[in-house]
């Protein structure tokens, strides 16, 4: 029982949760009752809390409702496995579509939520100039009508909830653990040179119809990814060619492909739903189920490209004996030309509490910047978060673009011009393009010390390579990954290593449901073909700083967590020749 408690606590702590003993005992009972793992239970809880409880922590009071939801979902998956798919799909005509829409309106009238997937849901109408959240359109939401007088510009203020905190400035993580950092800026006149590394962002900044890729173009991109990574794995294994995955063969052989989920075995990846999708040239594009019962360790997620060794005695299922992942490239060798310690501050949005638009944490962060005066500040979106309650309900005093301009004006007028500032967008910025990769913000009157880059990107700062993404790939991977690993293994380090081995900022495919990934542009701008000196991956998962394959990886979480202040990071980078050293800490805002 104590082992169950320990496993549960470790899984909850990965998401920044520390439930008490009574809650852990109740969760242990659920593990035995439903015969599930701690990882499965915690993942279910995260999804349940996000959709039903506004991200509340687990307690004895809300575990009852959670158990009901868990029971329904597990029974639904069992039903999917046991029942064949209907051979007679429902075909709607204009009469039934209208009837569905009328039924939803009737349900809403009785206080019952309308079906999320209702066909033909009517869009709300508003006066011209009213902020309409297009991502939420069609869900039956009504937006208040604003009078022109309400659209007057306002400036960020101070939230009473945020101002009552008592842990501001607390250092919650250090790297190395015994690091002593002096934030005094000794070389005040030195301005580090900041350059974008990789493909020029011209294709992203010009107008284009994103998410309009043809199915064949998407297939060609995915096929090429397997071929490129397959060549790397062949070199690692020392073999000439891979064999087809569906060949009838009792002897062991090597094949290559992409991990997929068999939808008939459940909505999420599990050991019963593992498929290996082969390439067109090697396996005629066919998929084969994988039996991984003989593996002592493994880690899989949808979209992962791996080499599989095993046999296929029936021609219908491959019995796997070993898995080979792509080799991880070493840290990029470069000539570092720092004139002294490079002080950096990094923060990721949102920068206002989830129930207001006062931006009090942003004001506090700006004050910290002007106190320390680092050489470089990296500020990552979202700035006007689509998940903010005011945005969701449409209760804004001005348009989305006006609100964003206010935030940018606050940054450019209040931050010292001795500080270089890099601004990274997010697909969650409601005023901007909801697509990944996200183009850089277009600012007409930007100051010389402000630089705008895309998400993701790699920056070259005087020979130090810093990889950045504001997209929460670690959280998305943690929800989709299945693994068997030794007790006490480093789960966060393993998730990060997937980015390096798959050579991508976002290797998950299909992506998270909330993401809109443009495959063609992702193929140009989301590759991570080498290991950088520093990788910044802010996430809703618990903050950490660690060395992964020679790269210092920082998850500073977010500047705001719900209705309370979050964290940001401070770094000091030194280097000479091709050697780079990083000291860092995560600090409460």
Image: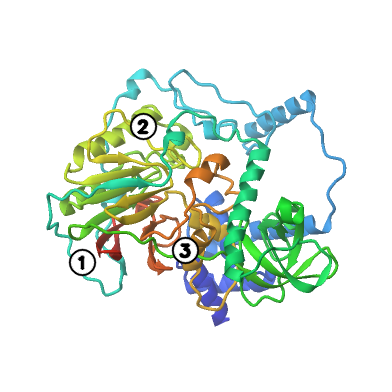
Badge 3 marks a residue whose secondary structure is: loop
Q: Residue at x 54, y 81 (%)?
A: 2
- Separation (CA) of disc 3 from disc 1: 30 Å
Of badges 3 and 1, the one in the foreground is 3
Front residue of this view, candidates 154 and 205:
205
Where is mark 1, residue-wise?
181
Front residue of this view, candidates 159 and 278:
278
Depicted 356 relative to depicted 17: above or below: above
Sequence-wise first label, 3 or 1: 1
Which label sits on residue 329?
A: 3
Sequence-wise first label, 2 or 3: 3
Q: Residues within 10 Å of mark 3 (few under 14, many from 20)?
A: some
Residue 392 place in picture, x, y as percent: 48, 37
Check whether the beta carbons of the residues at disc 2 and disc 3 lie within 8 A of each other.
no
Where is mark 2, residue-wise?
442
Front residue of this view, candidates 542 and 154:
542
Give the quadrant of the N terminus.
Answer: bottom right
- In-image side of 208 versus 565 (left or right): right
Badge 1 marks a residue whose secondary structure is: loop
Badge 2 marks a residue whose secondary structure is: loop
Q: Residue at x 41, y 55 (%)?
A: 538
Depicted 293 relative to depicted 52: above or below: below
């Amino acid at each position: 029982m104590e082992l169950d408690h320990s496993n549960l606590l470790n899984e909850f702590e990965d998401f920044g949760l520390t439930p008490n003993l009574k809650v852990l005992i109740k969760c242990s009972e659920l593990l035995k009752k439903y015969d599930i793992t701690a990882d499965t239970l915690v993942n279910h809880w995260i999804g349940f809390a996000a959709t039903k409880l506004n991200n509340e922590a687990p307690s004895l009071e809300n575990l009852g409702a959670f158990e009901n939801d868990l029971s329904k979902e597990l029974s639904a998956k069992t039903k999917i496995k046991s029942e064949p798919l209907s051979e007679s799909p429902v075909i709607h005509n204009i009469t039934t579509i209208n009837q569905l829409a009328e039924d939803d309106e009737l349900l809403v009238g009785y206080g019952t939520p309308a079906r999320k997937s209702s066909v033909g849901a009517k869009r709300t109408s508003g006066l011209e100039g009213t902020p309409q959240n297009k991502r939420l359109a069609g869900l039956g939401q009504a937006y208040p009508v604003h009078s022109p007088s309400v659209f007057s510009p306002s400036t960020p203020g101070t939230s009473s909830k945020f101002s009552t905190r008592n842990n501001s400035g607390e250092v919650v993580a250090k790297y190395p653990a015994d690091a002593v950092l002096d934030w005094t800026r000794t070389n005040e006149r030195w301005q580090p040179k900041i350059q974008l590394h990789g493909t020029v962002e011209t294709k992203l900044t010009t107008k284009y119809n994103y998410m309009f890729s043809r199915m064949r173009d998407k297939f060609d991109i995915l096929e090429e990814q397997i071929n490129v990574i397959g060549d790397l794995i062949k070199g690692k294994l020392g073999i000439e060619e891979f064999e087809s995955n569906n060949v009838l063969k009792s002897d062991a052989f090597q094949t290559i492909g992409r991990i997929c989920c068999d939808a008939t075995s459940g909505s999420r990846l599990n050991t019963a739903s593992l498929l290996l999708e082969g390439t067109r040239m090697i396996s005629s594009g066919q998929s084969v189920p994988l039996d991984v019962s003989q593996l002592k360790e493994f880690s899989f997620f949808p979209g992962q490209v791996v080499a599989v060794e095993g046999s296929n005695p029936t021609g219908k299922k491959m019995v796997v004996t070993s898995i080979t992942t792509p080799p991880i490239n070493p840290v990029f060798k470069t000539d570092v030309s720092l004139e002294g310690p490079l002080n950096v501050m990094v923060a990721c949005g949102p920068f206002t509490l989830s129930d207001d638009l006062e931006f009090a944490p942003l004001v506090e962060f700006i004050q910290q910047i002007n106190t320390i005066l680092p050489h470089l500040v990296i500020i990552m979106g979202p700035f006007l978060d689509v998940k903010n309650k005011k945005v969701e309900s449409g209760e804004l005093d001005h348009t989305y673009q006006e609100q964003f301009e206010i935030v940018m004006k606050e940054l450019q007028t209040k931050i010292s011009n001795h500080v270089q500032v890099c601004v990274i967008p997010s697909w969650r910025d409601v005023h901007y393009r909801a697509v990944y990769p996200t183009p850089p913000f277009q600012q007409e009157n930007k100051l010389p010390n402000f630089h705008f880059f895309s998400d993701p990107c790699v920056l070259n700062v005087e020979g130090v390579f810093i990889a950045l993404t504001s997209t929460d790939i670690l959280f998305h991977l943690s929800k989709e990954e299945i693994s068997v690993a030794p007790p006490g293994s480093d789960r966060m380090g393993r998730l990060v290593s997937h980015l390096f081995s798959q050579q991508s900022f976002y290797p998950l495919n299909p992506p998270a449901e909330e993401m809109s990934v443009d495959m063609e542009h992702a193929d140009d701008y989301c590759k991570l073909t080498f290991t950088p000196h520093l990788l910044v991956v802010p996430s809703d998962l618990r903050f950490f700083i660690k060395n992964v394959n020679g790269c210092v990886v920082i998850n500073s979480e977010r500047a705001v967590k719900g209705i309370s202040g979050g964290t940001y990071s401070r770094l000091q980078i030194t280097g000479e020749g091709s050697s780079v050293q990083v000291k860092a800490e995560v600090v409460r805002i």
